[in-house]
Amino acid sequence: MSKKTFAIAMIVCGFVLAVMILISPGIGTQDVGIIDAWRSLFDSEPNSIHYSIAWQLRFPRTLKALLAGSVLALCGAVFQTLFRNPLATPYTVGIASGASLGALICYKLHWVTTILGISSVSIGALTGAIGVLLVVLLLARSTARITGNTLLLAGVTIGFFCSGMMMFITSLADVSETHKTVRWLMGTLETYGHVELSMLLPLTIPPCLLLLWFARDLNQYSVGSELAASRGVRVERLEILAIIAGSLAVSAIVSMCGPIGFVGLIIPHLVRLAFGFDHRIVLPASILLGGSFLIGCDFLTALAPHWYGQLTHTATTTARLPIGVMTAIVGTPVFLVLLCSRRS
């Protein structure tokens, strides 16, 4: 690993993230600018309207976007290496489908409440995601040896089953239940205070640290499992632990935010294109850039309805777009540009 490349990657990605965090309290649907937001932090009246909007509503949302984007980008980079598939995402093993099915069941049963400050829908989604992970591991274990390919095939199969069950339940649901489910499936960063964040941290930080620890082994694995094994890498252990750790972290994120697409797909490719293929650089850079990307997309969810209203001279009833809609709108052209640049 080139120390110069590592330093450049960390400085560039860290600077982008720092800028996003600094301006985040001043961007939203309410008319509170960046200067007003930061001034309210040092104001003698901590309960002012500006302070409440900037630091009790916007900033927790930014922290949630930072955590979600970082985890999704990191797990996307790891899964693309493990499955040797450039189109692999954090949801490849069926995590998103399981979480979505769990959330849909909660809406169908009208089990929409809070437990210890956590939404029951989030609890149902986490249960569904972990349940799918366990089923995938059991199916993969039924073969002679658990490999990335068996986990991939089992995950895709269970994902299709969960999608079929979702369509079945949705066809029997009323309009209000369907609307709530569709909004959740589009992804959300809505948060009230720091309770959700405090619950997410212990579920995401340890698995992510384990994935970072595997950076050297992933470098060996990327050139071939047989060669990696000859160099002392315990390939089966690496595959199982990395996939379980990544899936647990993604399960926690999806349970709180819904399935947010494109972050885990395009950010690893962007990092590799800019800084190379060394996982000791790719993984931490993906964390920083993934958080920056999702924070930036969250800015656009607040600004896009206003821009649309000005462009069409109409009043919009939506104050903020779902985050998954914006990541798809922004991520698609970015991915196409990356694809064309690689071909050239």
Image: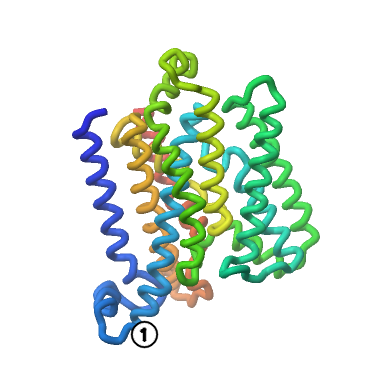
Residue 290 to residue 219: above or below: below
Q: Which of 203 and 251 lies nearest the eye of the viewer?
A: 203
Residue 329 visible to an observer of this rendering = no
Where residue 304 sits in the image (x, y, percent)? 42, 65
Residue 55 to residue 235: above or below: below
Left or right: residue 139 compared with residue 14: right
Which residue is label 1 attached to?
47
Circle 1 residues within 10 Å: few <14, some 14–19, many ≥20:
few
Quadrant of the snapshot with the C terminus: top left
Residue type at the position of mark 1? Asn
Q: Which residue is situated farthest in the right direction here?
A: 172
For residue 215, what is the image quadrant?
top left
- SS state under label 1: loop
Residue 143 visible to an observer of this rendering = yes
Left or right: residue 289 compared with residue 254: left
* Colour scheme shown: rainbow
Where residue 211 sits in the image (x, y, percent)? 44, 38
Give the residue at x 72% y 52%: 166
Q: Which of 326 and 95 lies nearest the eye of the viewer?
A: 95
